[in-house]
Amino acid sequence: MKNQSVLHLILAFGMGMFLISSAQADNPVIQTRYTADPAPVVINGKVYLYTDHDEPHATWFVMKDWRLYTSSDMVNWTDKGSPLSLKTFKWAQKDAWAPQVIERHGKFYCYAPMTQKGVGMSIGVAVADKPEGPFHDALGHALVHVSPLDIDPTVFIDKDGQAYLYWGNSQLYYVELNKDMISYNQHVGIVKVPLTAEGFGKRPGNNPRFTLYVEGPWFYRRGNLYYMVYAAGGIPEFIAYSTSPGPTGPWTYRGIIMPNHLPQLAFTNHPGVLDYKGHSYFFYHDQALPGGSGFDRSVCIEEFKYNPDGSFPTILPTKQGPAPVGHFNPYKTTPAATIAWETGIQTETSPTVGVYASCNQNGGYIKVESVDFGLQGPKSISARVSSTSEGTSIEIHLDSVDGPLAGTINVPNTGALSQWSAVQSPVSGIKGIHDVYFVFKGVSDSQGINFLSWKFSK
Ligand code: FUB
């Protein structure tokens, strides 16, 4: 009897932990794919999160394309597909590694490292008219190549208009980009930053890599202070930073931001830092998704506050990630590939309609967080769906996957998965702010639902 009570207690505690963690599980922020090396940027009031992408079941960095996700609240991320890939660069062989994108004069420049046939890692630049792409190779050859470890470009335009591109593994280089953003000042040339103990921290012992700097630099300015945040180590990497009064140094080592001893972290890490809607965010990657590893990583986000002197606090990885900064508007057409958390969902890209969500797992769901329906709630939902089976549906639940049922979208057999149908269903009992769960029912391996978009109406 006593043993049974203890068992019940353990089970109850375990379930409680499960419910708490599943209700808060918003890191990693992208679950439909393995993503790494986050490069966030604010464009027209929205966060554009560029990432690279680890192929599943990888035992090395197998990376073929770059991905884009957008958000206006830091919790719901819309999959915008792949704006560029190795195919964008004719001279690229493999290794679509850490990118960064910046806007100048209405054009968008993506700096990205990749292995150049017969040469080694080199950094290319692609340009687009829109942040979603398509990007095309601006040069037809690499922008910079100075060493076999030319990776991890970070780009920044200073207040005086001068743009800088820093990069490098085990060495840190920079060039001063010209205003065209696709060439650099040849008089200054490629500058190798002196890696001193004062600037980048000294490794213990007589390590041939003298300083802590490894890779993944993230360069920006805050007030009058320039920051270089980077992966440091050895392995596993931690995230450290240095600051400088000017864009090209001298640098002063300022310490560790994210330590490396936590099991959910991968053996690499890679920072991105962003201010958005009055909050500061730290982007990094871990290996916490199911099947995750050092070669199957996932982008995560933490909110933080700078100390009053501009220094970083220690930032530890969390499962819950940042709180939403603003509420989601359900009365506009929303791509179904807008996800705070999901189970059993894939996102795919169609050349005709763009990115859509699909589900073949009965009970699979998409959670959209902190949706503001207002005091007068909606009466209906319209959606674009496709299916080749009978009897499938998408249930709308509030606040948890088995929370109150607000409506059901019955999905018709549209004849082909590429054949989309607009459907409308009544909803009831919704007002105020809720997490919305789209729960897929009646689906199986052989009968799935494709879900393109949704919109509630009053
Ligand atoms: O993703 C490939 C490499 O791993 C990146 O370029 C490094 O920053 C490390 O994250």
Image: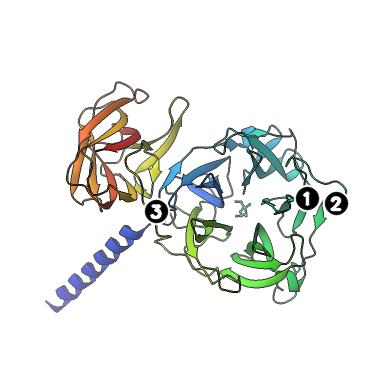
Residue 111, image x and y in percent? 67, 44
Foreground: 263 or 253? 253
* Residue type at tag 1: Glu
Rendering quarter of residue 4: bottom left
Q: Residues within 10 Å of mark 2 (few under 14, many from 20)?
A: few
What's the residue at 40%, 62% (across, down)? 319
State the scheme by which the image is colored.
rainbow
What's the residue at 37%, 24% (across, down)? 418
* Residue type at tag 3: Gly
299 lies above or below 119: below
- Please report contact status of discs 1 and 2: CB closer than 8 Å, yes or no: yes
* Label 3 vs 1, first from the N-terminus: 1
- Residue 77 seen in this snapshot: yes
* Residue type at tag 2: Val
Q: Residues within 10 Å of mark 1 (few under 14, many from 20)?
A: many
- Residue 57 seen in this snapshot: no
Which residue is under mark 2?
188
Residue 289, image x and y in percent? 43, 54
Which residue is under mark 1?
176
State the mark number for residue 199.
Answer: none
Q: Is mark 2 within 8 Å of ligand 1?
A: no
Rendering quarter of residue 442: top left
What's the residue at 34%, 22% (across, down)? 419
